[in-house]
Image (cartoon, rainbow, N blue to C red):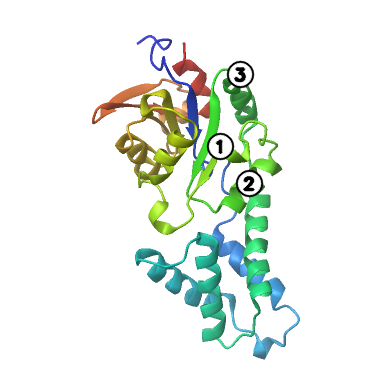
Amino acid sequence: MKETVRLNGKRAIFFDVNQTLVQQGLSFEQCFAEVWNDYSARWAAEDRPKADALWEQYITRWQQRKKGRTTFKQLDELQQQCLREAFEALMIPASSGILRSFMQDIRRLQVSAKTMAPQTANTLEALSRTYRLAIISNSPRSEVLMMLQRFGLESHFPEERVFTAQKPADKKPAPYLFKTALQTMQLSPRQALMVGNSWKHDVCGAVKAGLDAVWLHPGTAGSPAESGDKKISQQRLGKRKVYLIKQLEQLHQLFG
């Protein structure tokens, strides 16, 4: 199949961030425990709740709140409220400033542990010469901006082209972020392409919003991806096209 005629007519490429542009280093839970251990290091051992006890209190509330119809306007606000309730359940005193700093420290630790493949920057640089690049992410906006700054990608993704969920209902695969990005950038769905690692959130969400999509799926150990196979496959999902790539640098093969 010829590669050069696949994606004619595109004007913009939307990217997910985690596990697409950058790779996870530490999980949110690991960072949560490390920040708590630092925060409570000066306490006497008998007075210090264990990190897993605080985490259990936090994650239980987070899961309950994000499934319900929350009145919180932003994910940051929702996270801080769940953390506040977790502290209160264990009778740990904490001001609003401490709660805010706690979450910021978690994000900084997460971002510092992430890595980016060497070819990613070169791929983005080449694509940016022809296409407008944008971010569509379920991660908190502050975290995404921190990551772009750390890896020197702000020139490819200016803040006005970073679209993140402000509340749980906005998250992919819901159409809200895709439609907001299209409207803000004055694009029709057929003029944009979504690239991400999640079939459910990135691919299915984009297709429902009328976009073609690229699924970045490196495969598992022992798969053809491990032996250097860079064949691009294609399928239809509804009326839209979905392409499977194993490395981000394969994107240039999809454009004429």
Residue appearing at x 43%, y 38% in the figure:
220
Crowding at label 3, few (<14), some or many (≥20) Cα neighbours within 10 Å?
Answer: few
For numbered disc 1, what is the local secondary structure?
A: helix
For numbered disc 3, what is the local secondary structure?
A: loop
Q: Amino acid at mark 1?
A: Arg
| Pointers 2 and 3 in contact (C-beta within 8 Å) | no
> Which tag, 1 or 2, sits closer to the chain's start?
2
Q: Nearer the viewer, residue 227 or 93?
A: 93
As drawn, 118 above or below 164: above
| Residue under numbered circle 3 | 129
The quarter of the image holding the N terminus is top left
For numbered disc 2, what is the local secondary structure?
A: helix
| Residue under numbered circle 1 | 161
- Percent coordinates x, y for residue 32 in the rendering: 59, 66
Give the distance between the C-alpha atoms of the residues marked 2 and 3, in whole angstroms. Answer: 22 Å
- Percent coordinates x, y for residue 179 in the rendering: 40, 39
> Which tag, 3 or 1, sits closer to the chain's start?
3
Position of 204 with respect to 137 (left or right) is left
Give the distance between the C-alpha atoms of the residues marked 3 and 1, in whole angstroms. Answer: 16 Å
| Residue under numbered circle 2 | 145
Position of 13 with respect to 105 (left or right) is left
- Percent coordinates x, y for residue 172 in the rendering: 40, 47
Crowding at label 1, few (<14), some or many (≥20) Cα neighbours within 10 Å?
Answer: some
